[in-house]
């Protein structure tokens, strides 16, 4: 079993996901997709609490419009 990276993102446009509302400047974490085992990507709240799974299409949609990757080191 390989270890999948988790990346930190900043919300740039308000949206709702997994019965949670995310506002501008909120932080979310998204785990990489696992194509080998066909596991979906997992989304975590800023407190690193699991929220929901998302498809690759949903992830791409979020990246295109709602989130940007945080480049700060922490």
Image: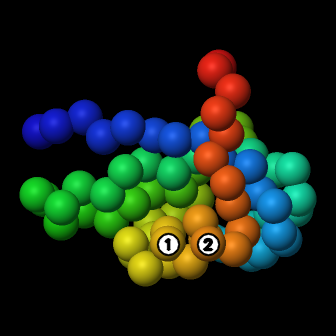
Q: Is residue 8 above or below residue 16?
A: above
Instruction: State the residue at coordinates (13%, 59%).
Output: 37
Position of residue 61 measured from the top left corner of the image (x, y, whole percent)? 56, 77
Position of residue 5 measured from the top left corner of the image (x, y, whole percent)? 38, 38
Position of residue 8 measured from the top left corner of the image (x, y, whole percent)? 61, 41
Residue 70 visible, this angle: yes
Most extreme residue toward the right is 24
Q: Dot 1 lies on which element?
A: helix
Instruction: State the residue at coordinates (37%, 51%).
Output: 32
Most extreme residue toward the top is 74
Mark 1: few/some/many CA within 10 Å (<14, 14-19, 20+): few
Mark 2: few/some/many CA within 10 Å (<14, 14-19, 20+): few
Instruction: State the residue at coordinates (45%, 66%).
Output: 53
Give the residue pinned by disc 1: 60
Instruction: State the residue at coordinates (67%, 54%).
Output: 68
Apparent side of residue 31 relative to residue 11 in the rendered image (left or right): left
Q: Dot 2 lies on which element?
A: helix
Residue 68 versus residue 25: which sits nearer the camera? 68
Residue 6 versus residue 50: which sits nearer the camera? 6
Apparent side of residue 43 relative to residue 56 in the rendered image (left or right): right
Residue 45 visible, this angle: no
Apparent side of residue 32 relative to residue 19 in the rendered image (left or right): left
Give the residue pinned by disc 2: 64
Q: Quadrant of the C terminus?
A: top right
Quote the CA–CA distance across marks 1 and 2: 6 Å
Q: Is residue 34 above or below residue 27?
A: below
């Amino acid at each position: 079993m390989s270890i999948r990276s988790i990346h930190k993102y900043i919300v740039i446009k308000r949206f709702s996901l997994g019965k949670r509302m995310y506002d501008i400047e909120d932080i979310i974490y998204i785990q990489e997709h696992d194509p080998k085992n066909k596991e979906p990507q997992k989304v975590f709240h800023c407190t690193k609490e699991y929220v929901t799974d998302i498809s690759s299409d949903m992830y791409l949609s979020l990246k295109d419009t709602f989130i940007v990757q945080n480049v700060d080191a922490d």
